[in-house]
Image (spheres, grey):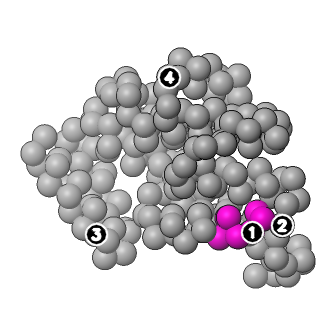
Amino acid sequence: RQEAALHAERARLQEDRNEIALAEESWSAALLLDPSHPRYLFYAASKRLKANEVLGALDDLDRCLGASPGDYACRRGMIQALIALDRLETARQNVEAWRDTRTKSLSAWVTLAEGRVDDALAELEGVDGTLASYLRGMALYQNNSPKAGALLGQVVDVWGGIADPMTQVLVGRARVGQALQSQPLMEVAGE
């Protein structure tokens, strides 16, 4: 486990230096040495989700939650993967089973995926954090609110430097939403 921890620390340092390929190798080595560590499983799932290997990501996240049921990153990833698979009922059941103060954003995420935009915005009232801001921005975008672009821009600024592939998926979506708020669709498609 100590050797796995060293690989994980190396991965974090490589991410800080923007050496993403080397960081990926280090994360893989850490997972190989400690296959039940939640952080390493989360990274593996994150990488798979970004590569659109959603079922594989779901398997890694399930293992992560089996090893550490309260791990918030794995919970967030599980909801993201279930929404990507359009398994909204399962996502809702998971959020309800985890019910605590940190799951308000996750619940709103499922509500937004269910198409209940105004209900999602209501759930997000008084909830802080970048995920809540992302969800608020996407909900406002779906409601054609001119406030969406600025809010999504803030999310891009805060999350833009995070190397985690799962977060980068959301950054990409926020960028598209922000761009569509300020530019005609044909200009965005041409970029």
The reply to whether the C-beta atoms of the residues labelled 1 and 4 are less than 8 Å apart is: no
Q: Secondary structure at mark 4?
A: helix
- Spatial CA distance of label 4 from label 2 is 34 Å
For residue 161, which numbered disc appears in the image?
A: none
The mark lying in front, picked from 4 and 2, is: 2
The mark lying in front, picked from 3 and 1, is: 1
Q: Which residue carries the number 1 mark?
A: 149
For residue 146, which numbered disc appears in the image?
A: 2
Would residue 113 be visible to someone looking at this image?
Answer: no
Q: Which residues are magenta?
A: 147-153
Quarter location, residue 156:
bottom right
User: How many numbered marks appear?
Assistant: 4
Which residue is depicted at the point 19% across and 42% down? Answer: 33
Q: Secondary structure at mark 1?
A: helix
- Spatial CA distance of label 1 from label 4 is 32 Å
Asked if the stretch drawn in magenta spans residue 81, the answer is no
The mark lying in front, picked from 3 and 4, is: 4
- Whole-percent x, y for residue 176 in the image: 73, 67
> Does 52 sit above or below residue 153?
above
